[in-house]
Image (cartoon, grey):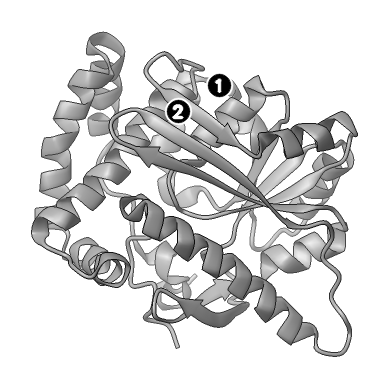
């Protein structure tokens, strides 16, 4: 595919080499999370200094969400992303000893699981989906994640080596092979949860412009069309990170069932996307450094 035809987030290449990731894993395993976090301070500083597009994207977002964007703010933003990524190394192994995790609204998903009813979870690149996925296993409501994972091949390969079963709950979006939809249907029919990102436009380019942090931005329509086709409940799900070791899981009811009318279908989808964007904005203002879309989110027409 031509690079210019890629969605904006696909044009942001994965940074860092395989050796660097392996060294960080070694430090985390041998010396622990505390030492690894110190190493990340230097990594984040290098990242901010060497990658202008990331700096500019962070500043554009931070100006909108908190009214200021100093270099220190940008550094803290990138460092938060790095710390959440580091925590994945522990979470995929089921090592929760370093973390304080709270869960709000999880009883709703547990009730659905007990009734063998599946649900769609609308996620965002806000905080950690890994902590949500890991803790959900402990609470007996399995969460699968539908997404495009090729932009993070190196870190995903590293996670796979830490826990070979990490892929069991991942459903890869294959743009030229829509059969992955059948896997989604099967998981929902089995009474499981399927999470899908609602804040990045996919390869099909289908999106609507809705208000987000002061200006219109493009949000995908696919999650709502998928949920309507599945006819299952829809929840919002966020895993907010708080320094130094706390995660707040939040599951919010969004719709018992999405039904799209034939007349005014586009308007109905846009209204759903606007509701989702408003809730993401709410959580961005609560935890502004948790937003991990490091590209110009408002650049597309």
Secondary structure state at the residue bearing disc 1 = helix
* Disc ID at residue 74: none
Q: Quadrant of the C terminus?
A: bottom left
**Spot occupied by residue 217 in the image (x, y as percentages of width and height):** 46, 78
Indicate whether 110 appears above or below 56.
above
**Spot occupied by residue 119 in the image (x, y as percentages of width and height):** 78, 47
Q: Which residue is identified by label 2?
A: 159
Indicate whether 215 appears above or below 195.
below
Secondary structure state at the residue bearing disc 2 = helix
Q: What residue lies at 14% left-to-right and 36% top-to-bottom?
A: 41
Indicate whether 5 appears above or below 35.
below
Can residue 202 be seen by looking at this rendering? Answer: no
Which class describes the residues within 10 Å of circle 2: few (<14), some (14-19), or many (20+)? many
Query: How far apart are the two marked residues, 1 and 2, measured between alpha carbons?
Result: 8 Å
* Disc ID at residue 164: 1
As drawn, is 78 to the left or to the right of 156?
left
As drawn, is 133 to the left or to the right of 38?
right
Can residue 218 be seen by looking at this rendering? Answer: yes
Q: What residue lies at 74% left-to-right and 41% top-to-bottom?
A: 193
Q: What residue lies at 58% left-to-right and 76% top-to-bottom?
A: 205
**Spot occupied by residue 34 in the image (x, y as percentages of width and height):** 22, 20
Marks 1/2 in contact by CB < 8 Å: the verdict is no
Res 227 → quadrant: bottom right
**Spot occupied by residue 139 in the image (x, y as percentages of width and height):** 67, 23
């Amino acid at each position: 595919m031509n690079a210019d035809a890629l969605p904006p987030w696909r044009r942001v290449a994965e940074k860092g080499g395989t050796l660097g990731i392996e060294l960080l894993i070694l430090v985390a395993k041998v010396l622990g999370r505390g030492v690894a976090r110190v190493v990340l301070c230097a990594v984040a500083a290098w990242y901010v200094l060497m990658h202008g597009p990331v700096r500019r994207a962070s500043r554009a977002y931070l100006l909108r969400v908190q009214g200021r964007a100093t270099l220190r703010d940008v550094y803290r933003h990138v460092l938060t992303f790095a710390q959440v990524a580091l925590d994945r190394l522990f979470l995929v192994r089921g090592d929760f000893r370093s973390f304080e995790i709270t869960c709000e609204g999880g009883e709703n998903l547990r009730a659905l699981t007990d009734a063998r009813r599946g649900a769609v979870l609308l996620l965002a690149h806000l905080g950690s989906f890994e902590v949500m996925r890991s803790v959900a296993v402990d609470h007996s409501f399995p969460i699968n994640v539908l997404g495009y994972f090729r932009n993070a091949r190196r870190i995903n390969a590293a996670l796979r080596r830490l826990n070979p079963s990490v892929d069991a709950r991942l459903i890869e979006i294959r743009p030229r092979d829509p059969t992955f939809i059948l896997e989604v249907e099967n998981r929902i029919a089995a009474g499981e949860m399927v999470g899908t990102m609602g804040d990045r436009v996919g390869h099909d380019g289908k999106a609507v412009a809705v208000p987000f942090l002061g200006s219109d931005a493009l949000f995908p329509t696919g999650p709502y069309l998928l949920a309507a086709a599945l006819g299952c409940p829809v929840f919002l799900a966020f895993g907010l990170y708080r320094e130094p070791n706390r995660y707040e899981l939040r599951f919010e009811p969004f719709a018992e069932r999405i039904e799209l009318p034939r007349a005014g279908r586009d308007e109905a989808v846009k209204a759903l996307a606007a509701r989702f964007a408003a809730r993401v904005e709410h959580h961005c203002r609560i935890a502004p450094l948790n937003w991990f879309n490091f590209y110009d989110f408002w650049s597309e027409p």
